[in-house]
Image (spheres, grey):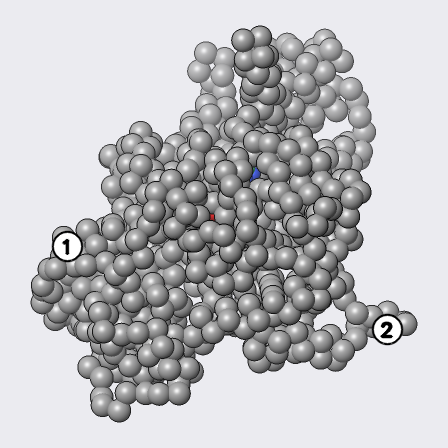
Amino acid sequence: MANLQLKEYNQQTSNTKTRLSWLWSEYSVIIAFLIIFIAASIMSPRFLDINNQLNILMQVSIIGIVALGMTVVMLSGGIDLSVGSVLVLVGVITVLALNASGSILVAILTALFVGSAAGFLNGLMVAKGRIASFIATLGMMAGARSIALYIAEGGSVSGEVSGFTAIANSDLWLIDYPIIIFLIMTVLVYVLMHKTRFGRYVYALGSNEKAALLSAIRVDRVKLGVYSLVGLLVSVAAIIETSRLNSISSSSSGVQYELDAIAAVIIGGTRMTGGRGKIIGTFFGVLILGILNNMMNLMNVSPHLQGFVKGSIIIVAVLFQKRE
Amino acid sequence: MSVNPFVTMSNIEKSFNGVPVLKSVTLKVQKGEIHALLGENGAGKSTLMNILGGVHQPDNGFIMMNGKEVKMNNPRVSQDQGISFIHQELNVVSDLRVYENMFLGAELKNKIGFLKVEEMCRQTSNVLSQLGVSINPKEYVRNLDTSYKQLIEIAKALLHKSSLIIMDEPTSSLAEHEVKRLFKLMKNLKKSGVSIIYISHKLKEIKEVCDRYTVLRDGEVVGTGSMKDENLETITRLMVGKSISEDRFMHDHSLGPVLLEVSNLTSEGLFNNINFTLRKGEILGFTGLAGDGRTELFESLFGYRKKYTGKVKINNQLVKIDHPSKAIKAGIGLVPKDRKENGIIKDLSVVHNMSLASMRNFEKTGLIQEKAEHQKFQYYKEKLNIKVHNPRITIDKLSGGNQQKVIIAKWLEVNPDIIIFDNPTQGIDVGAKQEIYHHINELVEQGKAIIILSSEAPEVLKVCHNIYVMYQGEITARLKGEEATEDEIMSYATGSKREAEKIG
Ligand SMILES: Nc1ncnc2c1ncn2[C@@H]1O[C@H](COP(=O)(O)OP(=O)(O)OP(=O)(O)O)[C@@H](O)[C@H]1O
Ligand SMILES: [Mg+2]
């Protein structure tokens, strides 16, 4: 009898142990986020200030939206290096459309169209042309930036229609629109990836493309969808970016966005080679990056050193992933 | 029996996520014996061998070799102890050449560090020829048939001078005569003092080569002894708790109208001028040796391969299938062989693997109904006796045979009019095999049509109405299921005989 109890007890401890290890493996990003959050609030009293918190969210919203798209491509086993350049191209064309038509609606529709068309083109190169996504989107990265520079003659373009700036500069009960848009996009992409057939197919083809094809999945179409979706999300980010200052610079906007987005995705626990990862992970990955940036500013770390800190964090995150 | 066994695994215990898989298992292997390790799918055979091979660590228990305790902390240690391990799932690297695979991690180099390519090729050819295989050592592995891949795995283990070879289902995609060669080799190894632990679900093979056996059931040893003293029936009963008939399945229903008609199907270098018809309610078998082109033929029919000429008619309608999704629309499903490469999606859960090809069945207003998926899985779990503790875990955590059952369930759920099974019972235990044959019979009674591709003549003889034998991309014979014999099939499969009259 005592023996039996002991056995049961052993079973229970091993159960809690496995439950803990399961919690860690599933939610390590959230735990890391909590640790960093607590550390930040101890190190700087200003960190917890509600305005500072909202400020962090505001600052990550653009990269956050891009990172959602990046998560989807990386889950499919690809990568999209063109997000920053496409964002600028979309921004420039949007401003031109805005000024020419005088209509905010036309500007937004133009933005969404240009973004998803660029993404579709990426998708064509990858799915039909069978070009490695790294190469295809590298080409798009150079090409889109170049066209943006050409159109804007190397400089900035500014909106001339009042009201366009309201998109990024209004708030609802203190919460800025970009934050709200970011949260809505997160929920939508979450539902898409975890509750629809499309999402399931993306995971499947990122894990084993041949088996996915043999399961009668139209792999080409899924890929086209994936890259178009990234383009669409990038154009949402571009609208916010342009509206915030009512202008966009063809040379300096969107630079290194792909790196920040990839960093957030990797920190969020998505595997580089596809098939494994979560939208929630990316969400917290984005927040972690935001807090780090914020802390470095609050603590007066030289901006020249900030890249080093970010780089180190990415490498540590990948090391953790490898241990699994 | 000598006093000191060569290898002793004592009171081994192992749990995964709190679920016990091995419960105080003891296994003793003598020097120079072939020891059969038997048991149902999920009994714990591979897990036990993974512990011996240093892949997993036991929670309890110890391993002795030659009277000394050894800790197998990682696969390297186990290799250094002279243990070679042929894993259940193929581990060849498709993008490397044959000889590179053979010497992976142990490349031969000369004094200044250059690879001795010719020497490696020579040794590769040597070992492979012992298995009766003549392939170019510089060929890329991805261009080879599954059975060659399996033979390469075996050859790789033979390359190292080992004192113990673990063979975890080495023959699951081999044809009869390849198995015979392997057995001859195993007997020679035995004579030179090498011990072999042999895992297989093909009991006839076991009777032929093994000296002693140990049977596992739900992670416990339920019997061990000398092969000579037992007959297959008692061993089967030990394994699955009942005896299994080896008779031919009887189907007393008449065949319906022609469902599928294939004429002049040709694909350069793979198969040539293929003609056959499939009727409603019919089970058709295709068999042959490695390189006979049957897999490529049906991959083409399924739309996975596109470069072929010829006509395919379904219900008397000409169809053009150039993508698997079109095959499903036309009513054709394919359960592929080589599950690790073509079947499972290892990052998806067991349930999601089951539903992947039939997502439409689980959707409501565009959203997936997870609950419906789980209920459906429970149905197949009972029907096919799939052993899984928690269906939310990823599929690669399942035992090999149980993975295969999930893949079969996936296609049963699609429910097409024609199902092509390529080596469907790869790694499946005798009891579950019977269940699957039963299921196939139920399907044809409902008016479906089935095509079974198998390298095992006994399997097609057991269930098929008609049997086509292929040799080097051509159909060499069409035989009646109840009249054909293994020898007859073999002589057509090796090309030593071919039917004179035109087939069709
Ligand atoms: N890494 C793992 N994580 C969780 N469970 C596992 C893991 N590996 C094996 N198992 C479980 O252990 C049990 C025994 O598996 P094992 O692979 O040893 O079976 P087996 O006897 O080789 O069966 P088969 O004949 O199908 O190959 C199975 O129920 C399986 O689900
Ligand atoms: Mg096994």
Please name the amino acid that badge 1 sits on.
Answer: Glu
The residue at 77%/52% (across/down) is: B81
Q: CA distance from mark 2 to mark 1?
A: 65 Å
Q: Is residue B14 left or right of residue B239?
A: right
Image quarter of the C terminus of chain A: top right
- The residue furthest right is B111
Where does the image place residue A75, in percent across and percent down from the top left? 51, 44
The secondary structure type at the circle numbered 1 is helix
- Badge 1: few (under 14), some or many (20 or more) residues near its Cα, within 10 Å? some
Residue A1 x, y percent position in the rendering? 54, 9
Question: Taking B181 as reference, is B3 left or right?
Answer: right
Residue A93 visible in the snapshot: no
- Looking at the image, is mark 2 or mark 1 earlier in the sequence? 2
Q: Which is more toward the observer, A227 or B333?
A: B333
The residue identified by callout 1 is: B445
Q: Which residue bears the numbered disc 2?
A: B110
Asked if the residue at tag 1 contacts the one at tag 2, i.e. Cβ–Cβ closer than 8 Å, the answer is no
